Image (spheres, rainbow, N blue to C red):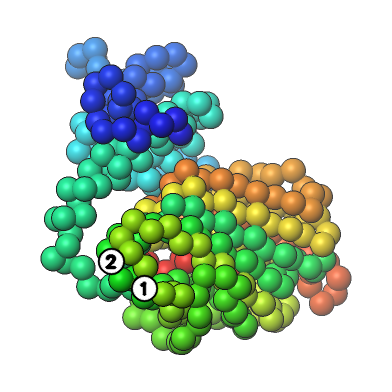
Amino acid sequence: MSPTEYAPASHSVAPRFPHEVLESLLMQAPYRDMWGQFVQRRRGKGVNIRAVATFMAYELSDAAGHEIAPEQYKDSIRRALKGEMLTDRTAMRFISAFGFTASEADELWRAIVHHRYLDKSIVSRHANHARRQDPKREYVTLSETLTLTINKDGLIRQFDFVEVVMVEHDKLQYFNPLFEGAGLDIEIVEGGKLKKITTEYEAGAENEENDIYNLVIEAPYPLAKGEIHRLHVRAYVQEQVEDNPDFVNHFGIGASERPKFNVTTLLIFDEGPAVIRHCFWDDNAYENPVVEEILSPGHTHYSMHYPVIHKAYCGFIWPIRRPDGKFGDINMRGNVLVPGSTKE
């Protein structure tokens, strides 16, 4: 993003509001023609919400694997176009259904980030001060990088979690990252000292085969408000074939109550997978991706960058080798290693 996009909101420097970006896109070719074919009765010159909902339901039914009724999307589309609320999930549905270009999608994300988080950051911080309950999370994630190493059988052997944060309140002493997985041996490479790990968390794991690893990491010293800090956590994974009964593996990030900015995931395979997909799931339902992108097979490196993740879930799925030497069916949904997937 350019520096002007972080400047205080004004008509000259701030990005347009997200609903303005959406309406502008939907009123131009080829997108107007996409939803226009579903208009049953013209009620003005603006965007027809029912027609947009019908088109999106039609387009996204294939990805969901079942028929979606337009009524399921109509309210969220109306709120988005009226400027009342635009969630990351709804934004991804628009991008996926209409096939916005990379520059168009980037413009929409810039508008969302600016007007939801940056333009109102000072007001929100003071408004939420009285409601803070967990001093261990009084920081903003400015960037996050997750790197996985995966053996020739498709099993995860190690992942590195590197997070750069900005402290929101004086005398921050602890960080509290959460990881979901099985058989994790965790160490702190940089940024603090591991004080405690528990595998009990009130929300529970998304997959019953996994545990939630709740880390308490002590900072090197009490951090001051506005200070930038870097945390590097490494986990060695003792994943076994029997931990994945459907012989399919996953990796994902998201579902956070607080936004995370500039998230990058990198998968390094010892042997390139014959099949691999990138998915944007709905409500952590692995069998119901909002977006399912088939990636070129056989590569040893795959990566993805997300400008912001908030109450959404993004990741990869690939098969693992069965005991008979064959690989599993990627259409199955099974065991999952999910760093940061539990709601924060």
Specify which label sits upstream in the sequence, 2 or 1.
Answer: 2
Question: In the displayed structure, would residue 22 be above or below residue 62?
Answer: above
* x and y, in percent, of residue 232 in the image: 56, 67
* x and y, in percent, of residue 32 in the image: 39, 17
> Where does label 2 land, which residue?
170
Amino acid marked by disc 2: Asp
Element class at badge 1 = strand
Amino acid marked by disc 1: Pro
For this rendering, which residue is in front, 317 or 145? Answer: 145
* x and y, in percent, of residue 181 in the image: 56, 76
Q: Which mark is residue 222?
A: 1
Crowd band around label 1 with a 10 angstrom C-alpha radius: few (<14), some (14–19), many (20+): few
Crowd band around label 2 with a 10 angstrom C-alpha radius: few (<14), some (14–19), many (20+): few
For this rendering, which residue is in front, 289 or 215? Answer: 215
Element class at badge 2 = loop
Question: In the displayed structure, would residue 304 be above or below residue 23?
Answer: below
For this rendering, which residue is in front, 32 or 90? Answer: 90
Q: Which residue lies at the image location 21% right of the left edge and 48% below the top edge?
A: 122
Q: Which residue lies at the image location 47% right of the left edge and 43% below the top edge?
A: 307
Q: Which mark is residue 263?
A: none
Q: CA distance from mark 2 to mark 1?
A: 8 Å
Residue 81 in view, yes or no: no
Q: Which residue lies at the image location 69% right of the left edge and 44% below the top edge?
A: 295
Q: Which residue lies at the image location 31% right of the left edge and 60% below the top edge?
A: 225
For the C terminus, give its image quadrant: bottom left
Residue 299 in view, yes or no: yes
Q: Are marks 2 and 1 in contact (CB under 8 Å)?
A: yes
Question: In the displayed structure, would residue 3 be above or below residue 290?
Answer: above
For this rendering, which residue is in front, 134 or 156? Answer: 134
Figure quadrant of residue 200:
bottom left
**Relative horizontal placement of residue 111, taking residue 184 as reference (left or right):** left
